[in-house]
Amino acid sequence: MTADRLYVPPAQKKISSQVRNFRDLSKYCEGYIKPRFIFRSSSLIPYQNDSLYKNLKLLDVNSIIDLRSEIEYLRASYNDWFLRDIHLYWVHLDISMPDEVLEKHNLTSLPFYKQFIWYILHYNQKELRRIFSVLANKKNYSIVIHCHEGRDRTGIIAALILLLLDVPEENIIQDYLASDMKTQYSDLEFLLAQITDFGGIREYLKSIYVTEEMQSQIRRILAP
């Protein structure tokens, strides 16, 4: 483990002290993903000010992937001045989970968060492909990925990225559980089992039209 991987820049410490769940995706996965390339977080919108902007730029943040719904986005969005040289990718992950869909797939007896994970994996394929398209473009880095709390939607995306980078499951679980006490080990186990049913992360991503070339490009960008 190198000193570079252990180093936490002052700008990152300042943001983490202010913004809930802001952390480097490499925090629990040293040696598998380059530090300071992807940060996961809760929404940055309540904290928009010059200090946050300057600290993000000190971390070379060029892009934000916002996973929130249209209702959330309309209630609270980014100011133009804050995005003056940060590219915003708004990727609305649908979490409506209609009863008829859950009934059709015999999922009504599953706990809520397992239904949530299943629905994102199966009914947000276009949106997930867009996220991985952003990740495949080196010009977009460094990237902040957030939803509202930085826990559920962000946790699923983080887990998929880490799976693609061959991060051991125990490290992925550690990252997932770090967000808050509402995250459950069994929920991430369910996600991992779903991906296994597809034949692994590479097959799952191919099924949503994230090509092998795109996957390889992401790995080239992010792997140490």
Image (spheres, rainbow, N blue to C red):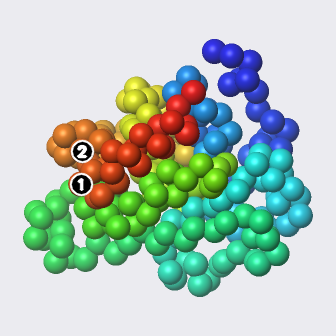
Residue 22, how many percent across, how many down?
66, 48
* Name of the residue lying farthest toward the top: 1
Locate residue 153 relative to residue 224 in the image: left or right: left
Q: Which mark is residue 28?
A: none
Q: Is residue 29 left or right of residue 140?
A: left
Q: Are marks 1 and 2 in contact (CB under 8 Å)?
A: yes
Residue 99 in view of the camera:
yes
Tell me if residue 16 comes above or below residue 4 in the rendering: below
Q: Amino acid at mark 1?
A: Ser
* Quadrant into which the C terminus falls: top right
Secondary structure beneath disc 2? helix
Foreground pick, 181 / 200:
200
Instruction: Look at mark 1 in the image and give the residue it sits on.
Output: 207
Give the image quarter of residue 80. Answer: bottom right
Quarter holding the N terminus?
A: top right
Q: Is residue 40 left or right of residue 8?
A: left
Whole-angstrom CA distance, mark 1 to mark 2, is 6 Å
Query: Which is more toward the observer, 40 or 135?
Result: 135
Residue type at the position of mark 2: Glu
For the point 55% across and 71% down, which residue is it?
90
Q: Is residue 186 above or below residue 127?
A: above
Q: Which quadrant holds residue 105?
A: bottom left
Q: Dot 2 corresponds to which residue?
A: 203
Whether 190 is drawn above or below 4: the answer is: below
Point 70% across, 69% down: residue? 45
User: What crowding class fits label 2: few (fewer than 14 Cα within 10 Å), some (14-19), or many (20 or more)?
Assistant: some
Q: Residue at x 52, y 58 (%)?
A: 134
